[in-house]
Amino acid sequence: MGWAAFYLSNVTGNSRILCSVYCNGSQIIGSSNITVYRLPERVELAPLPLWQPVGQNFTLRCQVEGGSPRTSLTVVLLRWEEELSRQPAVEEPAEVTATVLASRGHHGAHFSCRTELDMQPRGLGLFVNTSAPRQLRTFVLPVTPPRLVAPRFLEAETSWPVDCTLDGLFPASEAQVYLALGDQMLNATVVNHGDTLTATATAMARADQEGAQEIVCNVTLGGERREARENLTVFSFLGPILNLSEPSAPEGSTVTVSCMAGARVQVTLDGVPAAAPGQPAQLQLNATESDDGRSFFCSATLEVDGEFFHRNSSVQLRVLYGPKIDRATCPQHLKWKDKTRHVLQCQARGNPHPELRCLKEGSSREVPVGIPFFVNVTHNGTYQCQASSSRGRYTLVVVMDIEAGNSHFVLVFLAVLVTLGVVTVVVALMYVFREHKRSGRYHVRQESTSLPLTSMQPTEAMGEEPSTVE
């Protein structure tokens, strides 16, 4: 037996080959089928929507060009590696579709299309061809507008926080926020917490924006947007400006206090309102000691669209006076005992605050003022108490009369002795008088301090010496 080999070319389709041989005058015919297969020339998944709302259907479309035999060609639609649909490729070109319900889990997922040419039954393999993947983005944007928190009134050249919040959006991190005051875009800081988005900005109004304005918050996601708007009035509020004609005024001088503010502002100075809004308020006074440290208050009121705004200002007057020493609190004559402790209570006042010193006349001896000190006879004398400051001097004479402690003791001692002597003599005389009534006369012996008595006995009458009775 022998074999013959033939080379076939330009086979474009399935064919049946016949082989004929003659053997011993007989013709033998054999045949074989040739199956032609081709891989698809194009496998492509149609573009997906840029953003797909969650809860709505979208369609996957896969287009396949070429590939044979078609009976062995299958088209598979995938999410990642998960099969969503498997269908045969029928037409040329073939288009295979599948409907998918969008969910949050589909956000960021990759979808693709794969063809499978199964030639395994014919002794060949499984030929696979996959399209380029396409990514899907899904979103949720609520129908409700954002919550915009903004001031109703804003003073020019001042700032105020503005908050814009929207709940229930997905994915919140991919939402875009636009905040603006009129034509002025605000620099917003956006923070996400789950499905909640919060944008915060600081609104500062310019002077040229005075009047009615609008704050806008715009949240965009998935090609859709939600918007909130709030009306705002920008106003200017100048003042109050409170002035003293002389912040440090000498005693007896005239001081003018004035308060003013911007247009349409009503000012009130120490309870007395100005004649009309926009006009200043004034008062005058003759500065006295009692006005030193006096505060003046000015209030300003501005009405904007039925809303009243208030501001206050205060200023303190400084009156220059003195120095002075209060005679009521500084006795001019002091009578103290020697070797005792006392306090010289003198107070000086004035602005600027004076220095107070008390010096003894004719010497440089100084006694402390306002603190305890030990007094002795050397402090006796006249003192010049002088209060001095940059405005001058004030002098008050104080006399200190110090009583010596020993002379007082001697006088008291002598008085006691005299008193005792008188009492002793009286007692002795009463005794003599009583004895005389009983036995005759009595004599007092002068040289005895115990007052001895002598009794006149009958013998004494006859010339005898009397006996002494102690």
Image (cartoon, rainbow, N blue to C red):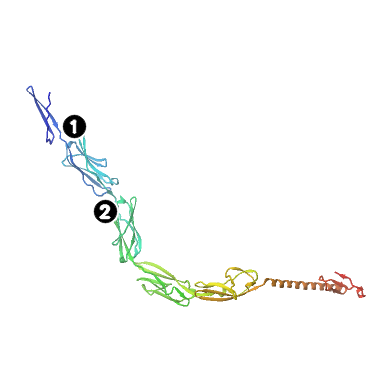
- Residue 5 is situated, as x and y percent measured from the top left of the image, at 12, 29
Q: Dot 2 lies on which element?
A: strand
Location of residue 29 (image quadrant): top left
Which image quadrant: the C terminus? bottom right
**142 or 130: which is nearer to us?**
130
Whole-percent x, y for residue 1 in the image: 12, 23
Q: Circle 1 sits on which residue?
A: 122
Taking the view exactly as shown, the residue that stands out farthest to the front is: 363
Residue 380 versus residue 25 in the image, above or below: below
Comparing labels 2 and 1, the label whose residue is closer to the camera: 1
Residue 89 picture quarter = top left
Q: In this view, does 285 lie to the left or right of 121?
A: right
The answer, for residue 332, to whether it is visible in the render is no
Amino acid of disc 1: Arg
Vertical position of residue 26 compared to residue 344: above or below: above
Of all residues shown, which one is farthest toward the top?
A: 24
Amino acid type of the residue that numbered disc 2 sits on in the rendered structure: Glu
Give whichever of 6, 42 is nearer the camera: 6
Q: Is residue 22 above or below residue 157?
A: above
The disc placed on residue 50 is none
Which badge, 2 or 1, is on the more N-terminal residue?
A: 1
Q: Which residue lies furthest to the right in this view?
A: 462
Give the mark count. Answer: 2
